[in-house]
Image: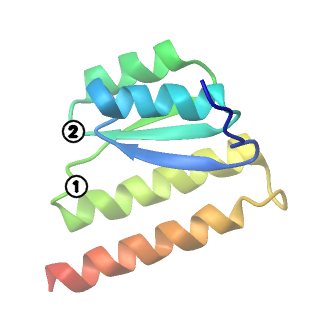
Amino acid sequence: MNQLDFKGRHAVVTGGATGLGFAIAQRLIASGGTVTLWDRDARSAGDAASRLGKGATAVTVEVTSHEQIQRAVEATLKHIAQVMGKGNGADKPGRTLSRVASAASARSQ
């Protein structure tokens, strides 16, 4: 397997509770990253995050709902701050997530 370096990086994996999303999350964590699993099935997402270990957290979200995306962004940013700490690059994913939330808002109007 080729080596990827995701140390100090965080990813949101939509549909991360099962299948390809779960496999991607496993690979990111194995490569040093942390992940937030976004999935509409709360139980499956929580179970998946538990199986992945301390580098993972789960957020229940229906990605077709602007309000749920906003809440998921807030929960994810809170997780990033806890895992990465302030001043350790945690603002970079936050800026990206803020752009995602703004784009979702523009599409829903």
- Residue 2 versus residue 47: which sits nearer the camera? 2
Percent x, y of residue 48:
39, 20
In this rendering, position of residue 98 left or right of residue 100: right
Answer above or below: position of 10 versus 88.
above
Q: Quadrant of the C terminus?
A: bottom left
Q: Secondary structure at mark 2?
A: loop
Q: What crowding class fits label 2: few (fewer than 14 Cα within 10 Å), some (14-19), or many (20 or more)?
A: some
Amino acid type at mark 2: Arg
Mark-to-mark CA distance, 2 and 1? 8 Å
Q: Quadrant of the N terminus?
A: top right
In percent of the image, x 21 and y 38: which residue is there? 40
Answer above or below: position of 90 versus 47.
below
Q: Is residue 55 visible?
A: no
* Sequence-first disc among 2 and 1: 2
Asked where in the image residue 6 lies, by quadrant, the reply is top right
In percent of the image, x 54 and y 29: which residue is there? 27
Answer above or below: position of 30 versus 50.
below
Percent x, y of residue 51:
48, 13
Amino acid type at mark 1: Val
- Residue 87 versus residue 8: which sits nearer the camera? 8
In this rendering, position of residue 23 left or right of residue 64: right
Residue corresponding to mark 1: 63
Percent x, y of residue 76:
50, 50
Label 2 with label 1: CB-CB less than 8 Å: yes
Residue corresponding to mark 2: 40
Q: Is residue 53 visible?
A: yes
Percent x, y of residue 92:
67, 67
Q: Residue furthest front?
A: 2
Q: Secondary structure at mark 1?
A: loop
Tag count: 2
